[in-house]
Amino acid sequence: MVQLLESYDFEIVAAVDNGPALLDALVTLRPEVAVVDVRLPPTFTDEGLQAALEARRRVPGLPILVLSQHVEQLYAKELLADASGGIGYLLKDRVLNSDQFVDAIRRVADGGTAMDPQVISQLLAGRSRREPLSTLTPREREVLKLMAEGCSNTAIAQRLIVSQGAVAKYTTSIFTKLDLTPADDSNRRVLAVLAYLNGTRADVS
């Protein structure tokens, strides 16, 4: 991994192999982007993810791209639930396509979102595949696009030069049109972003 990234002119500030060392490196060095394996020693369960989440709590907006062997929905939702800063979740197989992998890293470093298509598909499983993105107004789509880039409501308001109250009204309307009920409150932002990403990918393909 280090050799691959260095071949694309990335400067590696640290390469660690356990959760505590990862957390220390992320908080201390504050890299422009971190690539993190979900499973790290000593238990090989979720040390990498937990270190990444704790690092983002201590350093809000720290850009992190998580790699996992399998799609684990809870992890993906946890990552996307924090709308600040770049975030990504890819299956390890994507590393084999080095150009796409590096593109994902750079997107996350720039504050964007990089979600594996399989992750999106599984998170949307059980929901209607015909979520009415087409019913959104141009302004609502603009707000949703900024949400997908990881912007908070405050950041969206600054980017669009509107009040935070206006942004709140847009997001409420988006949730309503995407049939994201108040019962889903903790995950509505996550699912709205995933619906946008899935719809955008379908338009491109």
Image (cartoon, grey):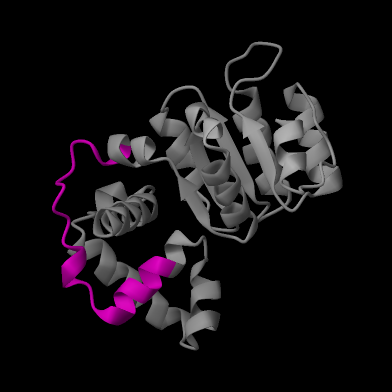
Query: Which residue ends up furthest to the bottom in the rendered image?
Result: 161
Tell me the residue at 42%/80% (across/down): 165
Compared across the picture, whether 16 is left or right of 149 comes to: right
Which residue is drawn at the image coordinates 79% and 27% (left, top)? 16
The N terminus, quarter of image: top right
Q: Quadrant of residue 39?
A: top right
Is residue 39 left or right of 26 when viewed as pictured? left
Asked if the magenta segment contains residue 139, the reply would be yes
Count up the numbered dots.
0
Q: Is residue 155 above or below residue 85?
A: below
User: Which residue is nearer to you in this view: 10 or 155?
Assistant: 10
* Vertical placement of residue 21 versus 139, above or below: above
Instruction: Name the spot of residue 203 as percent of width and height, x first.
Output: 25, 60
Residue 7 is covered by the magenta coloring: no
Q: In the rendered view, tell whether residue 87 sits above or below residue 70.
A: below
Residue that appears at 70% across and 14% down: 41
From the top left corner, tell me how far across and down residue 21 is, in percent: 81, 28
Quadrant of residue 116 within the rendered picture? top left
Seen at 45% across and 38% down, the residue is: 76
Q: Residue furthest top?
A: 43
Q: Which residues are magenta?
A: 123-145
Does residue 149 lie above or below 4 as drawn? below
Quick check: 132 left or right of 21?
Answer: left
Which x, y percent locates residue 94? 49, 34
Query: Where residue 46 sits in the image (x, y, percent)?
Result: 58, 22
